[in-house]
Amino acid sequence: MTHNNPIRDGDILVSAKAIFALGFFSHANSNNRYVEIWYNKVSEQTIVWVANRESPLTNTSGILSIDIHGNLIILDTQTPNPKPIWSANVSFPAFSSNTSAVLLDTGNFILVQNESQKVLWQSFDYPCNTYLPFMKLGLDRKTGINRFLTSWKSPNDPGTGNLTYKFDAAGIPQLFFYKNGAPVWRAGFGQILGFLKNGGPRCGISDKFECQCLPGFQPKNPKEWCLGDGSGGCIRKRNVSTCQSGEGFVIVASVKSPDTSKARVDASLSLEACNEKCLKDCSCAAYTSADGRTGSGCLTWHRDMLDTRTFAHVGQDLYVRVDAHELASYAKKPHGSLGKKGIIAIIVVSAFLVLLLMVYIVHWIVKKQKQARRKHSKYPSIVDLQDTRSIKDLESRQNLDLPFFDLSDIAEATNNFSPDNKLGQGGFGSVYKVIFRV
């Protein structure tokens, strides 16, 4: 698209591989016209960007063009002396007014200076409600452009809605989800959770109220807490000292660290040095590594710890400052030093040992019952040839006329059941000649 070849209402500009298309569009039950970009090959109209979302046309006389200064504008030609209802607002040196606009296959609509092919403006710097591959979010400190997503007012009104998704550059940069300008969610896994003050609480991922205060803290409003309302947050337990009174840190494993907007960062410190620094500063309430992947850097909290969440298998270790009494109580608990994985391992091993003991007891009981049956039976149906002593005892007690012999004596008398001593074979087995030495 050039100054002499504008896009009029009804025209469509298509990217090189026909992935995206640009043109004028109206939504259901509306006469408003917008310049929009959509997926060209998707049967259901899917809008990814809107130029004049705050200043729609009310007729079909609109033109998207490049003015004599090389700027990208939308005009309503039905009005006398038409003025732009939307502009890219790019400032050019005098020699840069020779420009053209191109729709790329990424969905990015760009304005370029023809001689140098330098990109002067791009739609990716002004996203609407859709994040496309190769888009960037956040503040560009060189240009001052802050890229973020905003919702539509309604499915048929692309005007700016009340939901925003953008980076907060304070502290360690982090993504926030805002509603009416107030933060309601911070980047991480889980559902939307209101921001809570002081020590938490920390909550799991569930539809139920499954929150608890961080170690050393207690609910600010116990009654509301019992009713499933943790919005009041948690406060430090009363009448305790965490300043040079034998205090220490308790590990809270697998957490999404608290909001870092007001946290302090020192990338040069190791985790051990971070511990020493936080312990010396009585205002330091908690610390963790600034880089969870390498365990390096130091991140400390000195005020409220907001939006802390626990996970099952991911997250960082958070070291929370507690008083001496609390520290001692956690030291006595298994989870104070072993963590969740250690507890699970102990439970599994213990269950296995109990099962093994039960199997042994059952085996012992069955064996004793068999021995008892043999003792009380006058004519045992099964004779354990290895238990020759018990058989002899049985013989002596019952005064049977038929004597019992040890298997070792019989083997010796038959020369280990030699064929030379075999006399014959009947219905009950082989018959051997025996020789007893007297």
Image (cartoon, rainbow, N blue to C red):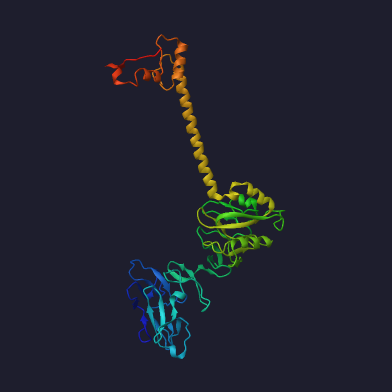
Q: Residue 33: where, in percent of width, then height?
A: 40, 75
310 in relation to 395, above or below:
below
Q: Residue 429: where, in percent of width, then height?
A: 30, 18
Farthest residue in the bottom direction? Answer: 94
Residue 77 can be seen, yes or no: no
Farthest residue in the front direction? Answer: 437
Q: Residue 255: where, in percent of width, then height?
A: 55, 57
73 in relation to 219, above or below:
below
In the image, taking residue 64 as reference, residue 138 lies left or right, namely right
In the image, taking residue 384 as reference, residue 207 lies left or right, namely right
> Hey, which quadrant is residue 424 in on the image?
top left
User: Who is closer to the viewer here, 255 or 9?
Assistant: 255
Q: Residue at x 71, y 58 (%)?
A: 244
User: Who is closer to the viewer here, 372 or 229?
Assistant: 372
In the image, taking residue 392 as reference, residue 281 lies left or right, namely right
Q: Where does the C terminus fall, quadrant-wise? A: top left
Residue 158 can be seen, yes or no: yes
331 in relation to 14, above or below:
above
Q: Residue at x 64, y 51 (%)?
A: 222
User: Who is closer to the viewer here, 277 or 37?
Assistant: 277
In the image, taking residue 369 as reference, residue 413 lies left or right, namely left
